[in-house]
Image (cartoon, grey):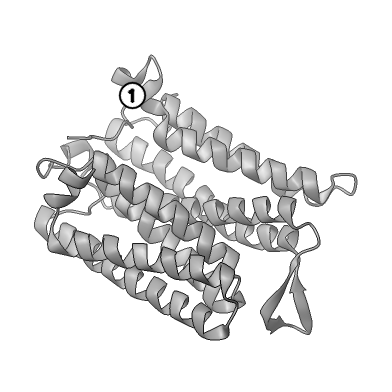
Amino acid sequence: MLESLYYTSGLFKSTFALYILTLLAYLVGTIRKEKIVGTISLILFFVAFIACTTLIVDRWIEAGRPPFKTFYESLMFAVWTVSLVSLVIEGRYRIRLIGLLASISIMLIIVYALSKRDVEIIAIPPALQTWLFIPHVISYFLSYGALFVAGIAAILHLIKPNGITSHHTLGGQARIDFSDFTYDITKFGFIFLTAGLLLGAWWGQVAWSNYWGWDPKENWAFITWLIFAAYLHFRNVSYWSKRKLSWVVIIGVAAIIFTYLGMDYLPTANDSLHVYSSD
């Protein structure tokens, strides 16, 4: 990893360092509960997000195309979306546990991205060169970022079923119920998940004259959609406990991770149109 990091740009190294500082600040915040520590953590997180944004824009300019084509590029965009969603939530609710767990996850993604770093810029195949490329990918990754954070909130609900006291008063309530919190984030993520699925089908029709090709990644994307649709349905069924609902969200996040990372390990990977280029 260190060798791969050595050959990255100065902008990547700066982004990497800022996320490390953000994680360290959140770790300090678990020991020292002062407000200033939480503020510093949030500021560092925001600065790291700006650096990540600059890194993506720089890659876009360098490649002459949206930087979503390769596995490495998609991983860095995942860092950006998880950062965006986490920052909005952290800024609104000041739940340091969300910021801490998101920072840990982001560092793991960046380290993994280093092992998949591109050797050279890869051009987009003609079939993918449509206006649908950008909204389809952005919709999916915004949903992934939101639903990933929802998964963190679901885990926190299992750990702290009675919730925690927020630093902000929310409509007269001083405590946050992580189950309700998970529900709110999941609703947001599900909208973009649905948009990504529909845009992907439209894109398939434009590129290959086929709305649905039964590609393994298409199938798993639909399975993931069904899991979160089931969660939103079960949320309105009285006999489904909040604990069970949290597990449904966690299973849904596991399905997202498999849809994103697991396709290479399937026997049909070589026939798939949705496996990321890695070199």
Location of residue 15 (image quadrant): bottom left
- Would residue 156 appear left or right of 75 to someone viewing this image? right
Which residue lies most toward the front here? 31
As drawn, the residue found furthest toward the top would be 267
> Front-most of 262 and 33?
33
Q: Quadrant of the C terminus?
A: top left
At label 1, counting other C-alpha atoms closer than 10 Å, the crowd grade (few under 14, some 14-19, many 20 or more) is some
Q: Is residue 136 visible?
A: no
The front one of 91 and 219 is 91
Residue 236 vs residue 57, the one in the foreground? 57
Q: What residue is rendered at 17% in x and 64% in y?
A: 11
Residue at 49% across / 53% down in the picture? 143
Question: Going 50% across and 80% down the picture, which residue do you hit?
Answer: 37
User: Disc 1 marks which amino acid?
Assistant: Ser
Q: Is residue 118 left or right of residue 18?
A: left
Left or right of 204, for residue 58: left
Q: Residue at x 34, y 21 (%)?
A: 269
Quick one: SS at disc 1? loop
Query: x, y percentage for residue 164?
Result: 73, 69
Is 235 situated above or below 278? below
Where's residue 250, x and y in %?
63, 43
Disc 1 target residue? 272
Residue most extreme to the right: 239
Task: Quadrant for residue 29, please give it.
Answer: bottom right
Q: Is residue 168 left or right of residue 254?
A: right
- Total marks placed: 1
- Measuring from the top left, give residue 265's x and y in whole percent: 39, 21
Q: Position of residue 275 (x, y in %)?
A: 31, 31
User: In the picture, residue 186 is in which quadrant?
Assistant: bottom right
